Image (cartoon, helix red, strand yellow):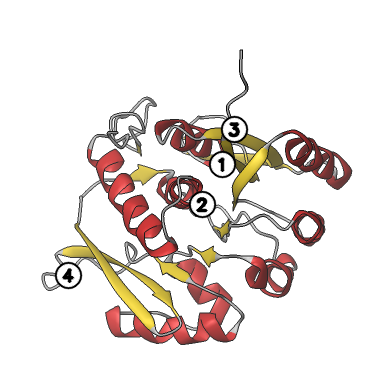
Amino acid sequence: MNRIPVLSALTIAGSDSGGGAGVQADLKTFAAHRVHGLSAFAALTAQNTRGVSAVHVPDTGFLRAQIDACFDDFEIGAVKLGMLATAEVIEAVADALEHYRPAHIVLDPVMVATSGARLLEPSALDALRTRLLPLASVITPNLPEAELLLGRAIADRAAMHGALDGLFALGAHAVLLKGGHLPDRGDVADVVDLFAMPGEVREIAHPRLQLDAHGTGCTLASAVAANLCLGRTLADSCVAAADYVHDALRLGYRPGRSEVLVLDHFGAAPRA
């Protein structure tokens, strides 16, 4: 059998034992886009749709071994970064990325779970700002994460636009700022995400769905990475990823005993 070159996407993130977020959501997203998925586990969580009850961070030497194994054997078109809980983990990942220099790096600066559980040690915030953010092709923070990065509140749509300059000042090359955490008021019928590169800002709007969901941030970043593997531009990848998350959320289901929704990755899969 002839070997056919296939680009792969690598997720370096935390696991979700409940299957709705983290590496598990990333691999589902890659598969739904017909991109081969690779993984390096940076954290293990005891987690379900009700929340995170425990976190274990593997040895950084083992994390680097996972990353090395992936780059040694596969053509990696994009890397997605998710939950990196400690400064030591961030330093190890940054060292690996500086060594391998993948074409695209999508950074989801995971800091707080949907349940409210803190997933990033306070000492790791500076390492994320200084080591990973400048390496990323695009960062995909939600509003609480952007507030932590910038050290100020983002209360409305105008403040979202203002936050873009602050994120560029930190070293970001491009930003997909997620607007779903803005208060649901009568004059805010849509969820509006902002995609920005220097000199370009694009609003990406979708009707607000009144749902409590799990894994949307992981899925968005991994969908951006998958679309970059497929040869789309960065702007088009971000728009397509936001569309994918909206559809997967609209088609979502509740596999656990809580009311939290898990995304339907394959129902939302792009049609060839």
Q: CA distance from mark 1 to mark 2?
A: 8 Å
Sequence-wise, which precedes: disc 1 or disc 2? 1
**Which residue lies under the disc numbered 3?**
5
**Which residue lies under the disc numbered 4?**
188
Category of crowding for the residue at label 3, using alpha-carbon neighbours closer than 10 angstroms: few (below 14), some (14–19), many (at least 20): few
Q: Are marks 1 and 2 in contact (CB under 8 Å)?
A: yes
Image-quadrant location for residue 15: top right
Number of numbered labels in the structure image = 4
Category of crowding for the residue at label 1, using alpha-carbon neighbours closer than 10 angstroms: few (below 14), some (14–19), many (at least 20): many
Q: Choose mark 4 or mark 1, whichever is in front.
A: 4
Position above or below: 254 against 180:
above
Task: Please state which amino acid type lies under the numbered disc 3.
Answer: Pro
Q: CA distance from mark 3 to mark 4?
A: 45 Å
Residue at horizontal 52 percent and vertical 80 percent from the top:
167
Residue 153 percent coordinates (x, y): 44, 81
Q: Choose mark 3 or mark 1, whichever is in front.
A: 3
Image mark for residue 113: 2
Q: Is residue 86 left or right of residue 45?
A: right
Image-quadrant location for residue 9: top right
Q: Nearer the viewer, residue 114 or 198?
A: 198
Task: Please state which amino acid type lies under the numbered disc 4.
Answer: Val
> Can see residue 201?
yes
Q: Is residue 8 left or right of residue 55?
A: left
**Which residue lies under the disc numbered 1?**
52
Residue 172 percent coordinates (x, y): 57, 75
Q: CA distance from mark 2 to mark 3?
A: 37 Å
